[in-house]
Image: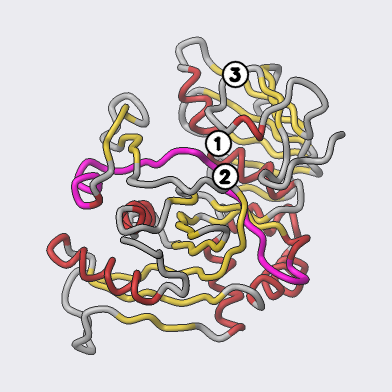
Amino acid sequence: MTTPPEDVPFTVAADLDLGVASSWLRTCGADVTIRRGVVPDTLPAVEAGGAAWWYAGDRMLIKPPCGVRFLVEGGESVRYAAQRDVAPADVRLFLLDSVWGALALQRGLLPLHASAVGRGRTVHAFTGPPGAGKSTLAAALAARGYPLFTDDMLILDPASFGTQAKCYRAKADLKLWPDASVLTGAVPGAPVRAGVGKRFADPARWSPHTAGRLRTLHCLSYSTGPPRDGAHCRIERLTRRRATFALYDALFRPRQAVAIVGRRRLFESLLAAAARHVQVSVFHRPQLHGRFEEGVACLAEALPARPATP
């Protein structure tokens, strides 16, 4: 096994186009192989499971509702089996989602459900439930001079937690709803899936870096009306204990992390260590189109690393 370059957490050899940066890919000697093959419909002796995933030993079976099954084994192998009418693009879409997160966990990494911007190698991330506006906010900040670092998933490296919270770009694409493209100025492209309104989009700027140091994590909270305290927006910094739990909520699949890593080690070792290096806050703002720029401006003012030019 070769040592991955500094800008990716592991290297991959695959029999399909992953749509990832070339630094991830190897024709031989990769850390992870991804191949079409036989995938069981069930796993014996299941230890944990959830919606469309099951875990046993070092094997995770993932069955998204798209006619494809994935088996992730030991952080070194992914096999997939797809029905004949499933497009390769759909296989890639789900592979770079739940499967990528499970693979990262099995390799001792922590995937966050977050979008992020950066300046140089300093990274600022945004997390929240679906619809909270992670991608939209990151795209809007990209137009203000904070290049987009990643969308939807950010990978943390616990091996770095002694001195920092090193992070990696997980995906090289941005997905937005049409109204979000209008708000942010991102250029819409092809549909993410047939029959789905969300589209791939090009932000104003991409960061040239795929690895960096995570400095802040903003948990997105919103209301559909004026804030109760009368303020337009506010940022509430969390204590380290609350930050640890916020980091757990920010994991791409928290229950999968517990199954693979173990609850005690996850909380007492990994997340607590990450909280020492990352400033975690809750960003309260009204989620109204007419006040969107107000929220973006508020957050841009609060980011420790300001761009040199707009």
- The answer to if 181 sits in the magenta stretch is yes
- The Cα–Cα distance between marks 1 and 3, rounded to whole angstroms, is 12 Å
Which quarter of the image is occupied by the N terminus? top right
In terms of depth relative to the viewer, which is nearer, 47 or 69?
A: 69
In this figure, which residue is indicated by the disc labeled 2? 170
Q: Which mark is residue 243?
A: none
Q: In this view, does 40 lie above or below 255?
A: above
- The Cα–Cα distance between marks 2 and 3, rounded to whole angstroms, is 17 Å
Q: Give the structural element (helix, strand or loop) at label 1.
A: helix
In this figure, which residue is indicated by the disc labeled 1? 96
Tell us which disc is closer to us: 1 or 2: 2
In this figure, which residue is indicated by the disc labeled 3? 16
The tag earlier along the polypeptide, 1 or 3, is: 3
Query: Looking at the image, which residue sits at the far bottom?
Result: 229
Mark 1 surroundings within 10 Å by alpha-carbon count, few (fewer than 14), some (14 through 19), many (20 or more): some
To which quarter of the image does residue 247 belong? bottom right
Disc 1 marks which amino acid? Leu
Q: Do the residues labelled 1 and 2 touch (CB within 8 Å)?
A: yes
The range drawn in magenta is 161-183
Residue at 30% over, 30% down: 189
Please state the horizontal and vertical placement of residue 147, each as a whole percent of the image.
42, 53
Query: Looking at the image, which residue sits at the far front?
Result: 308
Residue at 34% over, 69% down: 300
Mark 3 surroundings within 10 Å by alpha-carbon count, few (fewer than 14), some (14 through 19), many (20 or more): few
Left or right: residue 148 compared with residue 159: left
In terms of depth relative to the viewer, which is nearer, 43 or 266?
A: 266
Q: In this view, does 248 lie above or below 108?
A: below
